[in-house]
Image: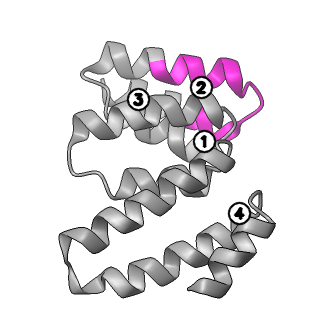
Amino acid sequence: NQMIESAIKAVPQSESLWLHWLQMAERDASGGSTSSSVHVTSIIRKALDQLPQSGKLWKALIDREDSPGDAKLLLEQAVQHCPTDIELWIALAALGADHAEARKIINRARQANPQSTEIWLAAAKLEEAY
């Protein structure tokens, strides 16, 4: 762990180093203790301070969230920092309170990514569902 921490201090903008440290911490936390879980979340937040545009780091943080309301708040932040990450937009739309809110989210995603076939397909699927 000391080596990876030293590497991150030397190259704080390296997504791959942060993700490696995160994997190591998750492996150490697999025992399920609360302090280990908090440590993993702390690593992700430190990584996001350095790399707020990393969709992978946002997804790691959101995956750790149990509350749909808190996950939605994190997703709102994530799409602001990663407006081209289609998975984040679709996840945010899925947490929309209703069809109208999901539609607004998908429309925002289409504005940010007008050439994304994934977003257009998500919009079509949303309309088909209602």
Q: Amino acid at mark 2?
A: Ala
Write down the residue under mark 4: 15
Nearer to us in this view, 72 or 127: 72
Q: Residue at x 49, y 58 (%)?
A: 44
- Can the viewer see residue 14 in this picture? yes
- Residue 4 pos. (x, y %): 65, 81
Cα–Cα gap, marks 4 and 2 = 24 Å
Indicate whether residue 121 is drawn in magenta: yes
Q: Amino acid at mark 4?
A: Glu
- Residue 123 pos. (x, y %): 51, 28
Write down the residue under mark 1: 86
Tags 1 and 2 touching, CB below 8 Å: yes
- Work out whether mark 4 precedes mark 2 in sequence or the reverse, and give the earlier one: 4
Query: Which portion, as a residue range, is magenta?
Result: 105-122
Q: Secondary structure at mark 3?
A: helix
Location of the C terminus by quadrant is top left
Q: Amino acid at mark 3?
A: Leu
